[in-house]
Image: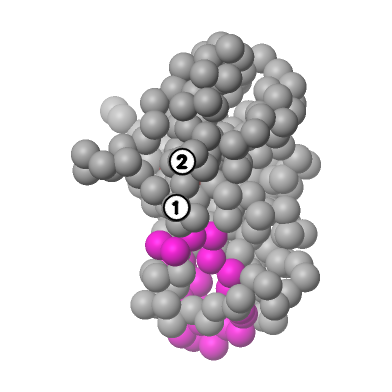
Amino acid sequence: MPKDLEKEKELAAKEAVKFITNDLVVGLGTGSTAFYVLKEVARLVNEGLRIKAVPTSNKTAEIAGKFNIPLLDINSIDHIDITIDGADEFNRDLVLIKGGGGALLKEKIVASMTRQEIIIADSSKQVLKLGKFPLPVEVIPFASSYVKRELALLGGLGNTRMKNDTLFLTDQGNYIIDIHFGPIEDPVDLADKLNRMEGIVCHGLFIGLANTLIMGVAETGTTITYSK
Ligand code: 5RP
């Protein structure tokens, strides 16, 4: 029987939300798993939970607004207490691939300002080696073909992301190239090379940013927590 991945997302989200207490500044992730967090936080805010939240995308800001979750301008604060976000892949070192939803840049900035970054996932996201999921790389449009050629020299073949027959644009107006590297043997080395490539604004390798990962397990209705 196929696993109930939606159930696993919800289980992980509800477990993670237990870490949120009054007066915290909370980073809100982007994507279908993070959506369960938004729903749960909205319920708690409605019951009197006092928090301020920082969204990781325009989409999340829009949903949070509809749910009456109070938002903060990220430039008015110097840290975020706790962020709950999803991932496209994770390994046992809590190295992640993120950016399937295109929000990687704001997600990485929010994660970098966060004291406790909790990643929530269903069990399909757990891998021994990262790389089955194509690595999202956000590029400024001016540099997109240059970056594609440079990535090919590193062994990565990429397509510029499309949405409804047009080029996908990030919240910042940039393109995303989704690159297939095959199994990523050394994420730190690859991240270092991508960090040094002109035209790349952000890549989806999140290294040393997640403190906790909560994975839902549908069969038992429980979660497994990995911590660093
Ligand atoms: C968005 C992300 C998401 O966290 C990631 O794509 C997972 O999404 P989902 O929970 O829908 O599977 O990085 O940029």
Please report the bounds of the magenta region as a residue range: 38-59
User: Is residue 25 in the magenta section?
Assistant: no
Residue at the (66%, 55%) spot, across then down: 109
Left or right: where 156 falls relative to 219: right
Q: Quadrant of the C terminus?
A: top right
Residue 209: horizontal and vertical position, in percent?
72, 45
**Which of the pair 12/204 is nearer the observer?**
204
**Is any part of residue 52 visible from this angle?**
yes
Residue at the (46%, 56%) spot, across then down: 171
Left or right: where 164 falls relative to 146: left
Residue 173 got which mark?
A: 1
Q: Is residue 145 above or below residue 82?
A: above
Q: Amino acid at mark 2?
A: Pro
CB within 8 Å, label 2 to label 1: yes
Farthest bottom residue in view: 48
Q: Is residue 32 above or below residue 77?
A: above
Q: Nearer the viewer, mark 2 or mark 1?
A: 2
Sequence-wise, the earlier of marks 2 and 1 is: 2
Quarter location, residue 63 = bottom left
Distance Cα–Cα, label 2 vs label 1: 8 Å
User: Is residue 48 in the magenta section?
Assistant: yes
Residue at the (53%, 82%) spot, across then down: 70
The residue singled out by tag 2 in the image is 141
Residue 138: horizontal and vertical position, in percent?
52, 40
**Dot 2, crowdedness within 10 Å: few (<14), some or many (≥20)?**
some
**Which of the pair 71/221 is nearer the observer?**
71
Q: Amino acid at mark 1?
A: Gly
Residue at the (59%, 69%) spot, across then down: 54
